[in-house]
Image (tube, helix red, strand yellow):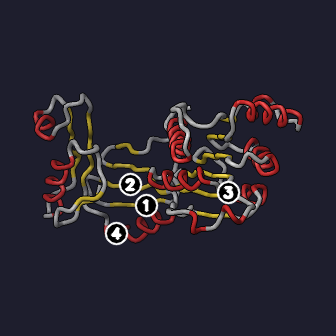
Amino acid sequence: MGISDHGDIVGSVSGGCVEGAVRETALEILDGASARIVEFGIDNAAAWTVGLSCGGKLEVVIQRFPDSISNELMAGLESGTPMTWIFDLASGENELGLEVDTGAPAMEQVDTRIIQRIPRPPTIIIVGGADIAVHLVQLGHQAGFETVLIDPRSVFTDPDRFPIRPTRLHTKWPQEVLPELSLDHNSFAVLLTHDPKIDDPALALLFESDIRYIGALGGRKTQKARRERLASQGHTETDIARIHGPVGLKIGAATPTEIAISILAEIIEVKNSRG
C-alpha cells in the first residue's frame, strides 16, 4: 500500500478495514517519525475503532519508501525480477538482493530485520487464442498474473482482439515456444484449442516440466478421447492425471467470460493451495 505525503492512497493492506489508521501513522512517519510495526486485532480497542472486528490479526510494517534502493526496486518490480528486500527497523537501512528462496515465507521478521521476498509474478500460459483466451488474459492481468498466449493461427493472435494484451504473444506452435519458458511451480497452463495437432505436443512438453497446473478445454467425451490418445502415445497415467478437465471450477459456466472466470478461479485455488 502506497501513501503520498499528501495522504493519497494506492493499494490496500486489509481490503478496507484498517487503511485509515495506517494512513495516519504513515503520514507521521513521512513527517519524520521512525518506521514501526503496527498491530491490529480484536483484543485491541483500536481495532474496533478502525473496523477490524472479523476476528483476524494484522501486523503492518510502515516505513518510508527506500530512497537508497528505489531505482533498483522499481526496475525489478516493473520487469518482474525476483528480489529479496531487507529492511532493518533499528537502523532504517535497506538492502536488495536478486535471489529469492521460494521455499521461505513471503515475509518474516528476524531480530530487527523485515525480510520480504518478491518472486516473479505468476504466469498463465494460454495455448489457443479464441474468445475464452481474450477474457482469461484480461481477468488474469487484473488478478496479478502475467500471461503468455501461444497460437500458430494468426487470426487468433491479432493484438487488436485483446482489450488488455497478453504480456507475450506468439504466433507459433507450442513446441517452438514452451522450451524457452520457465515451466515451474509459479506457472499455470491452459489449453483452449480443441485441436490435437496443437494441444498434444504442448501436453507432452508440459508433462516433462514442474508446471503447477495443466488445464484442457473440452467436455467429458473430449477428455476421454484425449486421455486415450495420450495413453496410446506412451504417456503415463500419472502424467495424464495432471490434466484438469473439464477445465475450471464447477460454477455452471456457459459463456466465454464465465468459462474464463471458472478457469482463473481454479488456477487461483491451485496457486494458493499448500501442495
Please name the amino acid that badge 4 sits on: Ser
Residue at the disc numbered 4: 68
| Percent x, y of residue 272 | 49, 37
Of 226 and 25, nearer the camera is 226
Compared with residue 37, is residue 226 higher up or lower down, i.e. above or below? Answer: above
| Percent x, y of residue 247 | 62, 37
Using the numbered discs, state the Cα–Cα distance from disc 1 to disc 4 in whole angstroms: 10 Å
Q: Is residue 272 left or right of residue 149?
A: left
Please name the amino acid that badge 1 sits on: Leu
Using the numbered discs, state the Cα–Cα distance from disc 2 to disc 4 in whole angstroms: 12 Å
Q: Which of marks 1 and 3 is in front?
A: 3
Lower position in the chain sequence, tag 2 or tag 1: 2
Using the numbered discs, state the Cα–Cα distance from disc 3 to disc 2 in whole angstroms: 29 Å
Residue at the disc numbered 1: 96
Lower position in the chain sequence, tag 1 or tag 3: 1
Residue count near mark 4 (Cα–Cα under 10 Å), binned few <14, some 14–19, many ≥20: few
Residue at the disc numbered 3: 181
| Percent x, y of residue 274 | 52, 32
At 38% from the left and 43% from the top, the residue drawn is 108
- Quadrant into which the N terminus falls: bottom left
Residue count near mark 2 (Cα–Cα under 10 Å), binned few <14, some 14–19, many ≥20: many
Q: Is residue 18 left or right of residue 181?
A: left
Lower position in the chain sequence, tag 4 or tag 3: 4
Residue at the disc numbered 2: 86
